[in-house]
Amino acid sequence: MTIEQLIWLVPLLPLLGFVINGLGRNSLSKGLVGIIGSGVILASFIISVVIFFSLQGDTQKSHEVFLFDWISAGTLHIPLSFLIDPLSSIMLLIITGIGFLIHLYSTSYMHNDEGFGKFFSYLNLFVFFMLLLVLGSNYIVMFIGWEGVGLCSYLLIGFWYTNTAYASAAKKAFVMNRIGDLGFLLGVFLMFNFFGSVEFSKIFPQAANMLPGNNTLVLITILLFIGACGKSAQLPLFTWLPDAMAGPTPVSALIHAATMVTAGIYMIARSSVLFDLAPLTQHIIAIVGITTALIAAIIALTQTDIKKVLAYSTVSQLGYMFLGLGVGAYTGSFFHVLTHAFFKALLFLGAGSVIHAMHHEQDMRHMGGLRKKLPVTFLTMMIGTIAIAGLPPFSGFFSKDEILANAYQYSPILWGVGVLTAFLTSFYMFRMMFLTFSGNYRGTHHEESHVHESPKAMTIPLIILAILAAIGGAINIPHVFGGNEWLAHWLSPVVAQHELDLTHSTEFTLMGVSVVAAIIALLYAYTRYVKGARVPVADEAPRSALAKLSYNKFYLDEIYDFIITKPLDAFSRFFYRIIDTKFIDGIVNGLGWSTNEASKGVRLLQSGNVGFYIFMMVFGIIALLAYTFYYI
């Protein structure tokens, strides 16, 4: 079968899984729900692998598959069509491959949950919309997938909606994403007005002939970037993602590590032709990205909830990816999307294994000494931690180094902040590992006796992801190490490429600085939390000013509440009490009152006297005749 014949099956299968599990959630057995939910994703993955290898042997490298005309109004023609090329083929492998492992993991993790069938139907629906997002050949199909994953994130974050805090977290994620989505939509409107189309194949060739710095292009790219900020959790729209840890742990791994939050990076990489022509936008992206990376890393230093540490780590790593996009390292940024999908999905699922073993305890202050109790979880999470810390030869080292090298070429200041962020990343990640797995168990002896390794359905995905996190960097080994940068060559027909103009000695020096910084952070964390056996005291706030800012998350939620939420609440109360109740209701009620009062007077004319009625009728006829005579 050809690529054109296979591609539509990739999103269709998860959609079928959603329909079957959604309708049969109360009648199908949990085993069958798990087989259907995981099986459709595995089938999509196998088809994606076939498509990927078919594309490798294809000289064309790009296929637009038309399904049907969707919207046609005036000059606006939007087909529902898919684009399969080097960029989307890699995304298919990430979404379906990592997605299958998370589905498999969920069959055990969620087994005792009453909403098992509903959970798998939501997961399948999410995968369907994410596939639609990356396969769309135009911005409207992409936007449908974009909105769909936003809806599914709301459903999955608030899956345990009976908990008020979890339901509020879901609403917060939904609203903050809508703010970004408005920017995306305005950018698409402006694009249609400027280019006369929303099709990639018509917009990008027109843009390629334009001069850099065009004001309209700058505005379009800024609006698209606002959309990316919402979906990919960048300042000032990132506070929803840490709260999204309210959802089940597999949700955190799927949505907030491997797929949904990378949608913004994918969209900008897909639109690299436009962003390359808007240097101002690129500069803004780089500044916002590195600022987000640094602030999130500082916040992660003092968190005690294991999932919150990973959540702020995700925000920080996404900031790194945006730094790469801003300095023109589109391939490096996408490379980090790949490696991050491996090690962050691994770390979230590993955290879920710890939480499962600890009977849903997430506070690291109540853990400790779990290394011997959870050997597989410990070993795999350690591999993920080494990878995210950027230590060679694990995957995170290669992707992070490529971003930092390009950042150095763009601005040594950005590179310096990036190295500082790498130092903090290494520290807070090893702090998390040492607090969780080293020292003595800090719970009761009864609790300790019940701690055990997770079942194979949970540990097998951990092992596979650990292998990928360890060797995943091989797909884009730089020339300085004798590699051929396979990923850069693969993406070159689709994503703008910029040569790195640094000597090998400079590259090695930059690598050495970042690696030494990560090792120093590791040793400091070891000295503090293993040798020094330091454990954060429960309910004790940090003493230093910076530690207080970190512990209280820079008071960002409080600031947003003060400058946005409270004024809007006051504004809405004013409209309710004055405009709605007194003005609008006053008009409506006044009309009713005046009609009622007028009828009281008019009803007196109904006297029952027939002679009076005849008199009024004759008077009316005379009045009509007079009107006709004088005015007509």
Image (tube, helix red, strand yellow):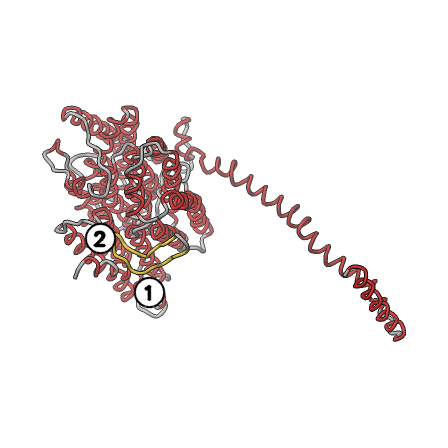
Graded by Cα atoms within 10 Å as few (under 14), some (14 to 19) or many (20 or more), the crowding at tag 1 reads many
Q: Is residue 238 left or right of residue 428?
A: right
Residue 328 percent across, percent down from the top left: 27, 34
Mark 2 lies on residue:
63
* Total labels drawn: 2
Residue 488 percent across, percent down from the top left: 18, 39
Front-most of residues 288 and 203: 203
Which residue shows up at 38% across the image and 42% down it? 194
Front-most of residues 631 and 264: 631
Q: Is residue 256 left or right of residue 53?
A: right
- Three-letter amino acid code at the position of disc 2: His
Which of the 4 image quadrants contains residue 625?
A: bottom right
| CA distance separating discs 1 and 2 | 32 Å
Graded by Cα atoms within 10 Å as few (under 14), some (14 to 19) or many (20 or more), the crowding at tag 2 reads some
Which of the 4 image quadrants contains residue 546?
A: top left
Image quarter hosting the C terminus: bottom right
- Three-letter amino acid code at the position of disc 1: Asn
Dot label at residue 432? none
Q: Is residue 543 left or right of residue 340?
A: right
Furthest-bottom residue in view? 610
Which residue shows up at 26% across the image and 47% down it? 345
Residue 39 percent across, percent down from the top left: 24, 62
Front-most of residues 312 and 332: 332
Which residue shows up at 65% across the image and 47% down it? 579
Q: Secondary structure at mark 1?
A: helix
Q: Nearer the viewer, mark 1 or mark 2?
A: 2
Q: Secondary structure at mark 2?
A: strand
Image quarter hosting the N terminus: bottom left
Chain-order first, disc 1 or disc 2:
1
Mark 1 lies on residue:
21
